[in-house]
Image: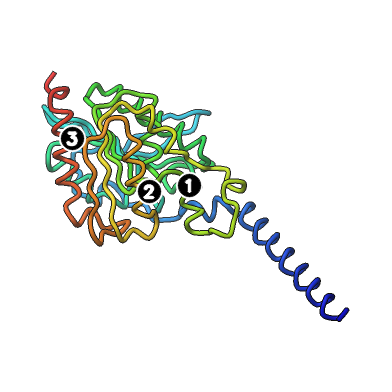
């Protein structure tokens, strides 16, 4: 029976070495797995945003963030839009066109490491960039509401924790990137491997702004339970919308802007009138 034990030992060694190789690959390539940084840049002139301007937002270390800005109409707030995890912020220009069409202003931008903004993409840089964008917008003197989509939900919650805004809208948010990673790779010790963890479930405890959460039951990127659980942790709950059959990128087509607009109007109308 010695040969059986030797084969079993050899198989075990192969499995251990293979698992170790998987761990090493994930750790060394984690940001390439975590972020989708490639994508084309849409020129502002190719949109209908005739009143918007391309801006450069200063952030820490002398870096600059590429963004678009348009002031709101009288009586309307400015939406600081924290984009998601794919390509450039410019690809969502149809959203900004709808914002402007209803009189809202907006500031949208690329974090460092995404197509419009050179630099290294890390959690620390992304959060610093989010604060820099808010401060740039706040200097314009308009009431501010926050919109965080997917990856940007953590950025917007971080900003709401450290700055004052009128309202916080979270689209397909997460509890943490550890939870996302564990859902996708249950065989890996994600909490030990991941450098950029974005523990939004902790940050939201210090957010005083009214919070609206939007999520879909068919979201295969961030499971709907995460949005539901995050909403339960919010100190100042406003509303949660769980769309049956809604996917990670499919809420906009199902009336998301109408819901967000009503939410912002409820909480920013008074401030915009001052």
Query: For the point 16% across and 52% down, which residue is it?
Result: 255
- Nearer the observer, 258 or 244: 244
Dot 2 and dot 3 residues touching (CB under 8 Å): no
- Nearer the observer, 55 or 233: 233
- Nearer the observer, 243 or 141: 243
The residue singled out by tag 1 in the image is: 177
Q: How far, Cα to Cα, is label 2 from label 3?
A: 23 Å
- Within-10-Å neighbours for mark 1: few <14, some 14–19, many 20+: many
Residue 28, horizontal then vertical, whole percent: 64, 52
Q: Secondary structure at mark 3?
A: helix
Query: Which label is found at residue 226?
Result: 2
9 left or right of 270 in image? right
Q: Quadrant of residue 146?
A: top left
Q: Which comes before the other along the chain, label 3 or label 1? A: 1
Mark 1 against mark 2, which lies toward the viewer?
2
208 left or right of 114 in image? left
Residue 23, horizontal then vertical, whole percent: 65, 57
Q: Secondary structure at mark 2?
A: helix
Residue 161, horizontal then vertical, whole percent: 38, 27
Dot 3 and dot 1 residues touching (CB under 8 Å): no
Query: For the point 26% across and 49% down, which residue is it?
Result: 93
Q: How far, Cα to Cα, is label 3 from label 1?
A: 27 Å
């Amino acid at each position: 029976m010695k040969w059986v034990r030797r084969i079993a030992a050899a198989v075990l060694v192969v499995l251990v070495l293979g698992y170790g190789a998987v761990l090493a690959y994930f750790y060394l390539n984690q940001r390439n797995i975590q972020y989708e940084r490639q994508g084309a840049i849409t020129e502002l002139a190719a949109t209908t945003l005739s009143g918007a301007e391309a801006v450069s937002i200063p952030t820490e270390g002398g870096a600059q963030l590429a963004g678009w800005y348009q002031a709101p109409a009288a009586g309307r707030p400015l939406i600081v839009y924290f984009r998601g995890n794919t390509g450039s912020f410019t690809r969502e220009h149809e959203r900004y066109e709808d914002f402007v069409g209803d009189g809202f202003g907006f500031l949208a931008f690329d974090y460092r490491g995404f197509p419009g903004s050179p630099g290294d993409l890390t959690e620390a840089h992304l959060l610093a960039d989010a604060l820099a964008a808010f401060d740039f917008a706040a200097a314009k003197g308009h009431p501010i509401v926050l919109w965080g989509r997917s990856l940007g939900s953590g950025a917007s919650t971080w900003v709401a924790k450290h700055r004052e805004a009128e309202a916080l809208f979270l689209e397909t948010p997460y509890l943490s990137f550890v939870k996302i990673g564990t859902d996708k790779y249950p065989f890996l010790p994600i909490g030990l491997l991941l450098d950029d963890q974005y523990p939004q479930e902790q940050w939201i405890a210090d957010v005083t702004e009214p919070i609206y959460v939007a999520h879909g039951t068919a979201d295969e990127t961030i499971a709907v339970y995460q949005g539901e659980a995050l909403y339960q942790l919010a100190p100042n709950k406003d509303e949660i919308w769980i769309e049956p059959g809604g996917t990670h990128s499919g809420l906009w087509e199902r009336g998301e802007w109408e819901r967000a607009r009503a939410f912002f109007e409820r909480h920013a109308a008074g401030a915009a009138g001052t």
